Image: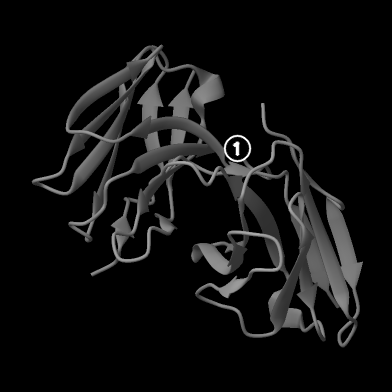
Amino acid sequence: QKEVEQNSGPLSVPEGAIASLNCTYSDRGSQSFFWYRQYSGKSPELIMSIYSNGDKEDGRFTAQLNKASQYVSLLIRDSQPSDSATYLCAVNRGRDDKIIFGKGTRLHILP
Amino acid sequence: DVKVTQSSRYLVKRTGEKVFLECVQDMDHENMFWYRQDPGLGLRLIYFSYDVKMKEKGDIPEGYSVSREKKERFSLILESASTNQTSMYLCATQTGQGNYGYTFGSGTRLTVV
């Protein structure tokens, strides 16, 4: 089982709709969870961190964590064309605290 | 905001050359990391450092070495560049206080010919 799994996409969402990105992880000892946005040819940029079960909102972004199901998600409300990017889920590995990255989901917002 | 500066945006080197990739950060972060990113393979950890003079191997250290002589600078060295080291190289930093996310530099796209 891969440590951090994401659907590679592309996920196509109409402008103004909610984009939902999902991620599962294998290490039950993980305590820190992150979402990065990466535009084509650019480096990843941290957009959300979440450490406890439930929802965390920041502007149009909501991160959701369910440790029992080992599941993290990112919701983007009122999607804009500028949200078109690859979104990387990242999780700290319990045994050595390293951050492990998923391979990312490509999101395409349709104008 | 933390600034993480990588010395070159694009680099072309010949097979067998010794290559130095530099990373400098200005926010006094203890932890620094080197990753490479390849299509279909994602981000892979090469080396990391939690302190000056300290270095540890990541998941794919073969063919690479690192140097951290000062807290703000972490260098990645390709001892003898090979074509399979053509990749995007990303430096990242992290505060040592608590488990926070990484801040990445802008990346160096290295092509070995």
Identified by mark 1, the residue type is Tyr
- The spot of residue A24 in percent (x, y) is 23, 51
Residue A48 higher or lower than B42, as above or below = above
Q: Which quadrant would the C terminus of chain B be assigned to in this image?
A: bottom right
Is residue A86 shown left or right of residue A5? right
Specify whether A58 is left or right of B5: left
Q: Secondary structure under badge 1?
A: loop
Percent of width and height locating residue B66: 73, 72
Viewer-proximal residue, A6 or B81?
B81
A37 left or right of A51? right
The residue that disc 1 covers is A39
The outermost residue toward the left is A68
Find residue B10 and report its horizontal and vertical position in percent.
Answer: 85, 55
Graded by Cα atoms within 10 Å as few (under 14), some (14 to 19) or many (20 or more), the crowding at tag 1 reads: some
Residue at 51% in and 30% down? A84
Q: Which of B75 and A75 is in front in this view?
A: B75
